[in-house]
Image: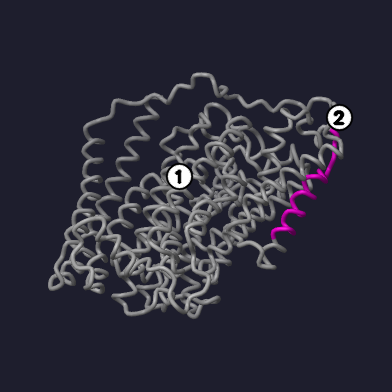
Amino acid sequence: MAESKPSGIIERLDKLNEFERQPVTADKLQSGRHFAGVFAGEHVAATEFVIGALFVSKGAHTCDVIVGLVFGNLLAVLSWVLVCAPIAVKTRLTLYWYLRKIGGPVVMVIYNILNALMYCILAGAMITVSASALRIPFGIPDQIGWLPNDIRFVFVVLVVGAVVVTLAIWGFRKLAQFAEICSPWMFLMFIAGALALMPAIIADAPEIGKLRSFHDFWRLADARIWPGPQPDQEGAWGFLHIMFIAWICNLAMHVGLSDMALFRYAKRASYGFYSTFGMYLGHYLAWICAGIMGAGAAIIIGKPLTALDSGSVATTALGVAGAIAVVIAGWTTSNPTIYRAGLALQIATPNWPRWLVTLLAGVVTTIVACSPFVFTKLLGFVAIYGILLMPVGAIVFVEHWLFPKIGLTQYWASRKGLTVNWPALIAWWVTLIGCVLSWALGYIHEFFLVVPAWICTAILYIVLSAVFGAREKLGELPEEAPAVASEGEQMGEAPRSSGSRTRAAVGLIAVAALLFCFGTALWVAVSANDVYATRLAYFKKAILYATGVYFIFGTIWLILKETSEKRAA
C-alpha cells in the first residue's frame, strides 16, 4: 500500500498527453474562449508594471506612447494571424517538432535547448516580479539590483516558483482555465490603479488644473507622466522605439513561431485574432495604466521611479489587492512560458514524460528568478531573445510557404536523410553574427534589427538550399496527417448547454464585484485634495474584499460552466 500511491500519481502525470511529438487530434481542439483567456492572462501580466513604467523613465513623449503602441501592437496581432497561426493549424505540430522535419535533428536540438533556456529566463522574470509583491508583508526592501539583498526574498521566490511549475505541469487546458478567471480582474486592476493615483499626479501639476477633457489629460501626461527626454538624459525613446518594442516584445512567439505550441489547438487560423485581447488589453491599456501608476507612486513615495519595483508601485495604488495583482499576473505569464520550455526540452529528453521535463525547466526558472536582474534588464533581454530565435521562424516560414511556389523541394533535408540542414544552420548564425556586429558597432539599435535580419535569413536560406540540393526531385516523406478537419471544412463548436439560473446568478455576483472595484476607483479619481487620502485608504480596503468575492464566485461559475458543457457533450 505504501508504494501504490506514488505509483498512481506518476501514472496520472504520464497520462497528461500534450501531443509533444504528433499532431493534435480533432477531438482535442479548443474553442476561441480558451485562446482569449490565455492571451489576455499572459499579456495582462506582472511585467506590464515594469515595461509601462519604463516609458516614463526613458523619456518618451505622450504622443509616442499613445500612437506608437497602436501600430506596434497591430503589427504583433497581424504576425500571429498571418505568420504563426496558419502554419500551426496546417501542421498541428509544435515548432519544436516541425523543425525536425525541416532542419534535421541537429538544428532542432540546438534550437530547442536554446529556446528552452530563453524561456526559463523569461519565466524567471515573471516569478521575480510576483515575488516583488509578496516581499512587502515581510518587510523585505525593494529588489532592484543584480542580486537579492535579503535572503528572505529567495524563499519567497521559491514558494512562487513552486505554484507556477505545478500549474504548468497540468497543461494547456488548465492554463487557459486559470487565465480565464484571472484576466478580467487583472485588467480592471490596471485601470483602477491608474484612476486611483490620478489625483496625486494632478495635485503635483497645479498649472494644469482640473481635468475637464481629453485635451487636459494630454497636457497633464506631457507635464508629469511622459514628459519626453530630460536635459541630462541620453538615449530617450521615440515613436519608432515604442512601436518596435510593442512588436518585438513577443517576437519569438509570433514571427519566431514558438506559439505554434498554442495554435496547434486552434480550430481555424483566424483564431490568431484572439491575440488582440493580449495586445490591446495588455500591451496597450495596461502599459499606459502602468505608466500612470508609476508616475503617481513616485510622487506619493517621494522616490524616483527607477528606485521602485513593481510591488511598490502596485501596492501604492491598490494596497494588498495590488500585491495580489502582481503575484497573479506573474503566474499567468510564467505558467505558459514554462509550459513552452517543457515542450522544447522534450526534444533533448525523448524518453522523459512532459511533466518531468516541465518540472526540471521550472526548477531552473525558479533558480534564475532569485536574481532581480532578470526583470530590471527585461526589455534588453526580450529584444536579444527575439532576434536570437526569430531567424528559425524565417527558415520555417520560407520552407513551408515559399519553397513549393518557387520550385524548391519541401523538407528536402529530411528526404535526403541529412542529420544537419547546413543551409539552415549557416543562414541562422550568419544572420546572428551580422546582428551582433551591427548592434555592437552602433550601426542600428537592437529594436530595429528585426526586419533586416528576417529578410537576410530568408534570402540566405533560399540561395543555400538551392545550392545544397533543394532543387532535386526527391521521394515523399511518410505522411503525419492529423485527424482534423481542413481549414475549409465546417467544424462545429462544442455543444452549448442552455445554462442555469444558479450559474447566471453566480456570474452576476462576480461581475458586480468587478463593477464595484471600478466604481470605487472612479470615486477616488474625482476626489478633492482634502478627501483624497481618506478615499484612497478606503478604496484599498474595499477592493480587497471585492477581489475575494470575485474569485470565489468566478471560480464557482467556471466550475458550473465546465460541468454543464461536459454533460451536454
Q: Residue furthest top?
A: 489
Number of numbered labels in the structure image: 2
Q: Give the residue type at disc 2.
A: Glu
Q: Residue at x 58, y 47 (%)?
A: 10
* First to last magenta residue range: 416-435
SS class of the residue under badge 1? helix
Q: Give the residue type at disc 1.
A: Val
Q: In this view of the protein, which residue sits in the foreground, 432 or 173?
A: 432
Position of 312 with respect to 528 (left or right) is right
Residue 300 to residue 538: above or below: below
Q: Residue 134 appears in which quarter of the rendering?
A: bottom left
Residue 528 to residue 555: above or below: below
User: Where is residue 426 drawn, in percent x and y?
Assistant: 80, 50
Q: Residues within 10 Å of mark 1 (few under 14, many from 20)?
A: many
Give the foreground label among 2 and 1. Answer: 2
Dot 2 corresponds to which residue?
Answer: 472
Q: Characterize the magenta stretch by its predominant secondary structure.
A: helix
Dot 1 corresponds to which residue?
Answer: 38
